[in-house]
Structure formats: C-alpha cells, structure tokens
Amino acid sequence: MKGLAKKVAITAVAVVALAAMMWPSTAAAQDARLGFIQRQRQIEQELQFDTGTGETKEQLLNFEWGGWFTSSYELFHDNGIISGGVITQGVHERHLAQYDLRLWGRANISSYAQVYARIRLGYVDWEVGDSLTSQDHYLDGPNLDRGYVSFDLRRAIEEWQGHRPSWTVNTQIGRQYVEWGTGLVLSLPVDAVMVNGEFGDLNVRAVAAQSINSIDNIDRSAAVAERLERDFYGVEIEMQGFEKHRPFAYALRAIDRTTTPVGSSQRYGYDAWYFGVGSRGILWNPKWTYTSEVVWETGRGYADVLTGPGPNELEDIQAFAADVQVNYFMGGVHKPRFSAQYTFASGDDDRVRPSDTVSGNLWGSNDYGFNAFGFRYTGYSFAPVVTNIHVLRAGFAFLPFPESDVFDQLELGADVFGYASAQTGGVSDVSAGTGSRSLGYEADTHIYWRIVSDLSLVVRYGVFMPGEAFLDGTSRHSLYTGVTLSF
C-alpha cells in the first residue's frame, strides 16, 4: 500500500505540474458545443478499459464483474459571439470537472453465449456560469451504458455435436458500440441487432439499429439539437482470402425519425444512403499498416424553408468522403510509431451551417455536403466535425523510459494538423466565415501513463492557430487531465 500511495502522490504532482506548464496565458476561442462533443468522444474512446468481448470460460456458467472510476478536469474556451462580421462578445474560459463511475458484469454460458451489462454514473461539476447546459452541477445517471446478449453458433454446435463447422454465425442483441467500415459513416453506441457470418474467406455483417435518444443530434438546429433519432440498416462484406489485405464494401441506410415541432413551417428530415469501399492491412511488411475508405452518400433532406418562395421541400443529397491512414511501427524497446492520415468530406457552398437544416441547404438546390454518424480524431482543440473539410494529420508516439520501474508504461506523443474547407460554405465551427477556405493548423500532445496495472493517467493538450477564414485569429487552447482507477 505504501508503494501505491507513493505512486498516487507522484501522479497528483505530475497532473498539477503539467497543467501549470502547459496552460498558456493568451485568450482563445472555441466553438463550444460541437467542439466539446468531439472532445468528449475522443476521451471516451481512450477510457474504454473493458469492452465485454473477452474470452468466455469453459465452465457451464460463470460470472465476472469489474469497473473503473475516472476523475478528470478540462479547461477550454468558447468562441464568443460574432454577428455581422463583428466580434460582439469575447471568448469565455470554461472549467469542467467530471467524476465518472462504470460498473460492468458479464455472465458466460459455457463457451458460446454471453450476457453483458455496464452501468454509468457521473457527476458533472462546471465552474459557476461556465456550463453548456442550463445546470452547473448535476448527477448524470445511472444510465445503461452497454447491455447485450451474444451467441456464437459455431461454438454451440461444436459443444453440442462434437464437430466444428467451417462456417459460423455470431449474433449480438442490445445496446452496443457499432463501427461500420473504418468508422467514417457510423461509430456510435446504438440499440442494435448485429449478425456476423464467416463463410470461408467471406465475412458478412448485417445490422438493424436505433440511435440512443440522449445522444446529441448531428443537426444542431435549435428545435431538434438535443435528440438523435435515427434508424440504421446495413450490410458489410469483407474478403479475408488475401495474405496482407482485407478489402470491404458496404451499404448503410440512415432513416431520420426527427419529429417536426407542432406548428413549424420548417420540416426536418435527412434520409441518406451510404455506399463505401475500403481496405485494411499490411503494406511492405508488418511494420507498415494502413486503412482506407471511400464513401458516396445519396438520399434526400429538407432545405431551409426561409431560403425559398414556397413550402418546405426535400432536396437531393450528392456527397462524398474519403479517409486513408498509414502507420509505421519501428520496433525496439522505445516502441516508436509514426502515422499519417488524410480525411476529406465534401461540402456545399450555399450552406452556412454544414450539418443543420436551419441555415442549411438552400431551397431548390442539391445538397453536396457530407453528413454522417462516424468519428475521426481531428484535433483536440479545434475538433471539427467531418463535413466540408480537408484534414491532414501527422503524428508519433513512443515510450521514453522503457527500462524504468516507475515510468516504463509512460507514453509521450504528438500530432500536427492542417485544415482547409472543401467549399467556401460553413464548417462545424460557427466562428469561421465563408470567405476563405484556409482554416488553420493545430499541434496536440498527449501523455498516457499506466502507473500500475489498475491506475492510469491521461493528459491531453492542444493549440489551434486559426486561418484566414476566422475573424478572430487568436490561438485556441484546450487541456484535459484524467486519472482512472480500474478494478
């Protein structure tokens, strides 16, 4: 216990010292709500200590449980208020402390079935006046974070009949995280029926899912921003017969169930098809890996009724997106790794708000802006949504002290980003104008430190330097520190 207490004390000192060193004195701006959502999604991905997909045991029935607790602090700025090309209110510094408890349990039925549930309970503690909602301090939950039943038909046949089929079908039903393709069009927790089949070298996935209403809508129009109401249906095929590559193709349908407010002349609806192709695999040797994906989006969505002479009309969607990432793992005791990534999503030059209905697509015109439900790490400070944008990223990470007893699991890393809009229309940061496509640059750093097997530290810091598209060219900074105890 003395050793653990000492390491906890070292952690606390490190957090305070890093915060003091990293936080700059210059004022900054941040598109508060969308940027905040993007950062929270990145943090959520980094703190997944148990996914519930571990190997089942050989006993007829056994039960496992665990959890983790995270205490974190964030500091960032909003973008103030810009009206008519004039800054009418300066940036506001926001402070947020969060306390997050996850408890999970898993019941394994022999080797072929599993029941999994995870509960989340959090406390949100904004500094007075800083909240992005109507409350500064509130309890969030308890909520069902994950909860599903899974069944492996091949393992069941093997146990029941004593032979192993060359094919298999797996089914998972309930609240789960679904990532389609490489996650460019869908990467969300949803309530879903997921079926996965392996037939020789062919892997086929099918999904029927419904969004969780408590998740924020991608349409940030005031009347519908707080609830994501979509149904998803899709099929994905992956070829596994190649030595180094796993090409895939998919079709995904997203149906909008958003309710139009009573008496509103503005109707809401964005029904889209996504058709994607891509591949994952190895390039020259196992040290070089890659992922790639290209998406065509079609469908119909409502335009902004105030931009036309008649009633609300559905307009055609014709949009594209692409992503490619290359990784290089050098090897050795420091385990350095390098990565380069390019992400593109088409835009519509007549949209002021790239994902919204209000101030969105003009009445009587096609919608060329790509909008989907996936996720890409696009920077910690700027954190733009993947719509109407080019993002170029280069990054590296390594273990600086691999032979140290205390710091052997400490990783340092950095990423640099360059941004440009695809069209002169708006991007997800409302403080960017539409007169220039130059959005700017960003540099991020991170520290991941597994202090002991069940205690971890995460520190993230990002600085964004706005380009010509922004009226306010002041650099923007964001800081996150979090300590997680798993059990």
Image: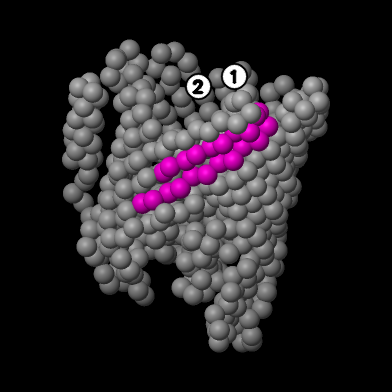
Q: What residue is drawn where x is 58% and y is 58%?
A: 211
Residue to which mark 1 is pinned: 286
- In the rendered structure, does residue 105 fall within the stretch colored magenta? yes
SS for tag 2? strand
Residue to which mark 2 is pinned: 329
On the picture, is 48 further left or further right than 480? right
- Please tell me whether the stretch drawn in magenta is mainly helix, strand or loop: strand
Residue 431 seen from this side = yes
Q: In the rendered structure, which amino acid carries the disc numbered 1?
A: Pro
- Pinpoint residue 336: horizontal percent, then vertical percent: 43, 21
- The magenta-colored residue range is 102-122
Looking at the rendering, which quadrant does residue 183 occupy?
Answer: top right
* Tags 1 and 2 touching, CB below 8 Å: yes
Residue 441 seen from this side = no
Q: What residue is drawn where x is 43% and y is 42%?
A: 103
Q: Which residue is at the front of the view, 207 or 313?
A: 207
- Pinpoint residue 355: horizontal percent, then vertical percent: 53, 64
Residue 101, above or below 11: below
Q: What residue is drawn where x is 48% and y is 18%?
A: 330
SS for tag 1? loop
Residue 197, above or below 212: above
